[in-house]
Amino acid sequence: MDPGTNADLAALVKVVARQRAEMARLRDLAATSAVLERAKGVLMAVTGCTPSAAHEELARRARDGNRTLLEQCWLTLGTLPPGQEPAGPPAPPPAVGSGGSAPAGSTDLAEVLGRVGRDLVRVGSPHELAGRLLDHLAPQAGADAVMLYERLPEGGLRLIGYAGLDPTLAAQWRQVPPLAGIPALDALRSGEPCWLEDIATDRTRYLLIGDPPERWLSRAWLPMPAGDASHVALGVLRRRSGPFEPRERELLRAAARLCAGRLRAFDDPPAGAPGGVAQTVQAVFDALPGAAILLSPLCSPTGEVEDYRIDAATPEAVDVFGRTGRDMVGRHILESYPSVAGEPLWQGYLQALETGVPFEGEPFAYQDVVGEMPVTATYTVRAAPLGEGLVVTWLRHAPMDRQEQRLADVQRLGNLGWANWNLITQETSWATQTYAVLGLTPGQEPVRLEGLPGLALPEDTGSLAHAIDELVSQGRPFDVPFRIETPAGVRHLRMVAEAVTAPDGTPVEVHGFVQDLTAQRSAELALVESERAMLLQRGILQAERALAARLQHALLPLPSKPVRLAGLRVEVAYLPAQSGIHVGGDWFSAIELPDSDALFVVGDVAGHGIDAVATMAQLRFTAKGMVSTGSSLTGALARLNQLLLHSRDSQITATMVLARYDPDRQVLAWAQAGHPPPLLVRRGEVRFLDRPGGMLLGAMAAPAFESLDLRLEPGDRLLLYTDGLVERPGEGLDAGFARLAEAVRAHGCGESGSLETLLATMLADERRDDVCVLDIRMPLEEDAQDATEAADG
């Protein structure tokens, strides 16, 4: 929705509210003008005064008796004996019954209202008012029950008085939610009486009170006028059916107006009571600038504050409907400022009442209209107890106040404070934050400009004193760091100052600021120390890498081209990790044994660096020696496991594939210790070998190792590798194995498949671990024969 539409709707609502209020005022004025003139005639006849004097006398009596002018008029008329009423405007016509004459036992309407007015003056509560009202309306209007409903701020109704009802039924209808079809609510909303005179029709339109509703065959609900709107509805219930006669309607309207005045009197403090300070406060408020109101709490029967009545208001106070000053007096807060309900401000009012301590809310922005121009200003609401009530003021913050607050906020957030030194008068002024920065107690005598170096550490005194001397003598500004000693430790400060000079160039005033840079300086020192430690650590790691790389190269030389061992073509690839600066423990062996067999080993030691390289060398040479001297593959693995368990670092583990090839039988015997399975390529088919049993080395004291035999056929290709070839971050080993098989199937089958192409496909991304691969190929029969002939020749 367009924001302008909301503003237009709000303006229309205000216009409609004002028009309704004016219509109610004119209606009340027309209804009471005749009564007023007749009451004035009574006083004129009795005292012989003028009409204006009679009017003033009626108004005075009303004020003294805490009554409305209408109540006073009816009381004045009620004091006359029958037949002695002075001449004046005609009295209201008598009610006409079915026979065209007044009902039996009915009296003149003015006399009836006079008696009602006299009785209402003496009642002390809404419940008592309902009882007295029923006493008069029963014989005059056939009333069998009377109810008084008050409209709640949230829109529902509360029963505040009743007569002629069963207490159980009254309790059931004590609270009425803001539903549709409630005749009392309709009367309050429209400001017009609601006459229910046909039970059959009315029960289809309204929710009727009664058990059953037919107990009362006709009803009337009349709003009690109270300024612009009505807040209390008078209900008259009759057991007889049929419409209300004109005289009865006129009587009920007049009774509603009389009750409205009496109910307002209940809210007003009695004259002379301790809380009756409204008139005095209003007289003071009339002379005060700004916006302020005096509130009196309105409590429920349980003692809870339900609302507040405005007892006095300054001329500049205004509510949401545009009422100002004295026009607001008598209104309720939830009527004049409905948005305050349930807000922190409402809780602040309650807190001030309960504790007696003034409450001050958070500043808020509000848009005023000055000369038809919107002006946004910042306000603070303050509520202070006064007697049994509250004085609520709206404090508007001037732009200068906001600038001072912003300056204080900047100094606090920036941990700095300003300072001024007058060199002529020797006056010194500091901000409050300056004391905090310098570690001094607020309120003590500020330090003179030449005394500032005395606060600094001895190492910094000279530079600060020199800068101040040049500023005072030559007007040269400075920006000098220095340190001071405080109970919390050394504090790093910065002083910036400049001079204000006379026309002849002589410095006459110095102004500047001092700033606490301890946190920043500490962070800088910590950063420098961290960088220094990082450089030292990097140097150590680079030296370790260089040493490990040299050891690895010395211990694990790589052949520059494929070699032939026991009739097999063997190609080796070793690729270090691309990330990190450590050297890993991946290794291999491919040698021919004394009995012409070939030994193939691929291993991976957990960890990196010098320790991993040393363990790799130990395992490599030990494995070669044991197998060369006749140890079985499984026996060699068992001894290597014991070697790791009893090494200096018993936490080191390793994986390994150990294979021995017999060229006469063309059989490859192999065993493994927790290592990935070899991959076999045969006649275009790619598969991983089933692994024999075997636990990784160094994991347990007595693992069981097994071995398997594989007969190689011409054209076979066998890949022994470390896990760096198949592992990727966030990917399982099964996915890595599948990716390797697919790469070999696409690029590695047949004689044209090269190890270099395979590695380029598998290791396209960054490697986080070393990769070691033994590519073992069984030549075809003709290739093997050519190789044999070439060896014999």
Image (cartoon, rainbow, N blue to C red):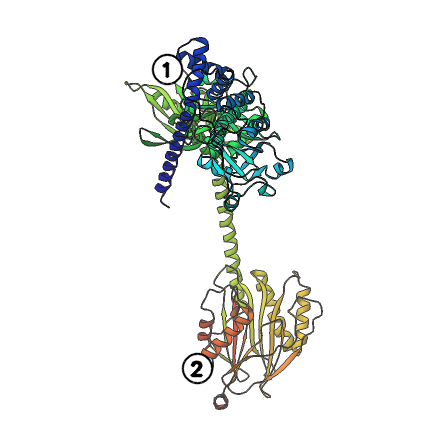
Determine which of the numbered discs, if any, sits on residue 424 in the image. 1
- Residue 448: x and y in percent read 44, 19
Q: Is residue 678 left or right of residue 746?
A: right
User: Is residue 699 in view?
Assistant: yes
Above or below 666: residue 727: above
Q: Secondary structure at mark 2?
A: loop
x and y percent of residue 261 in the render? 50, 24
Residue beneath the point at 43% across and 82% down: 752
Q: Is residue 47 above or below residue 550?
A: above
Asked if residue 362 shows in the view, the reply is no
**Which residue was labeled with disc 2?**
752
Using the numbered discs, state the Cα–Cα distance from disc 1 to disc 2 in whole angstroms: 99 Å
Within-10-Å neighbours for mark 1: few <14, some 14–19, many 20+: few
Q: Tag 1's secondary structure?
A: loop
Counting the numbered discs, the total is: 2
Residue 299: image quadrant is top right
Q: Residue at x 60, y 43 (%)?
A: 212
Q: Which one is in front, 386 or 108?
A: 108
Name the residue type under label 2.
Ser
